Amino acid sequence: MPSAYAWTITQDKICEGEETGVTGPSDAPQHLLEQLKDNPGSCHTFSMFDDDGELYYIGKAAWDEPAEGTEEACAGPLDDFGRPNAGCTYITWEDHPEWDIG
């Protein structure tokens, strides 16, 4: 069963842009990946930080209606990419502080 969310890194603040354009998770539905690419204005913006508060990544996320605001979807970019790739410890969501995790 595919994921109910998808995300993309739009800005890589630590590796000179090397991770810009990375998408996930591996089972992200194609329609959500297309939404991220074709209509990023309709997506939610997130930022991921390390435990010292250093900004590592900025990105966009999209999800199907039932997943909006759920812990799984809001933690997805952090759990799928930020934490294992760079040791990020928290994620914040623009205009939705109630979705912040970490």
Image (cartoon, helix red, strand yellow):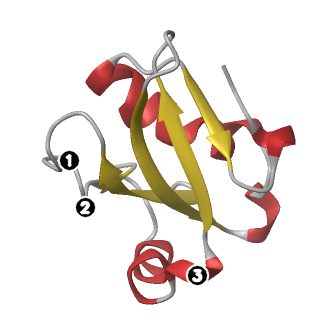
Query: Where is mark 2, residue-wise?
Result: 21
Q: Is residue 4 above or below residue 70?
A: below
- What residue is at 55 percent from the left and 60 percent from the top? 61
Circle 2 SS class: loop
Q: CA distance from mark 3 to mark 2?
A: 16 Å
| Position of the C terminus by quadrant | top right
When the figure is inspected, residue 78 is found, relative to residue 70, above or below; the finding is above
Q: Position of residue 80 (x, y in %)?
A: 42, 35
Among the two numbered marks 1 and 3 on one chain, the one whose residue lies closer to the N terminus: 1
Residue at left offset 14%, top offset 44%: 16
Residue type at numbered disc 1: Glu
Mark 1 in CB contact with mark 2 (< 8 angstroms): yes
Q: Residue at x 24, y 33 (%)?
A: 14
- On the image, numbered disc 1 is attached to which residue? 19
Classify residue 77 as left or right of residue 26: right
Instruction: Please state if 57 lies on the left or on the right of 100 as rendered.
Output: left
Q: Quadrant of residue 11?
A: bottom left
Which residue is most to the bottom?
38
Q: Are marks 3 and 2 in contact (CB under 8 Å)?
A: no
93 or 26, which lies in front?
93
- 56 vs 59, left or right, is left
Q: Position of residue 47 (x, y in %)?
A: 53, 43
Q: Which residue is mark 3?
A: 41
Amino acid bearing label 3: Gly
Callout 2 environment at 10 Å: few (<14), some (14 to 19), or many (20+)? some
- Residue farthest toward the top in the current orientation of the protein: 52
Q: Are there few (<14), some (14-19), or many (20+) residues within 10 Å of tag 3?
A: few
What is the secondary structure assignment of the residue under circle 1? loop
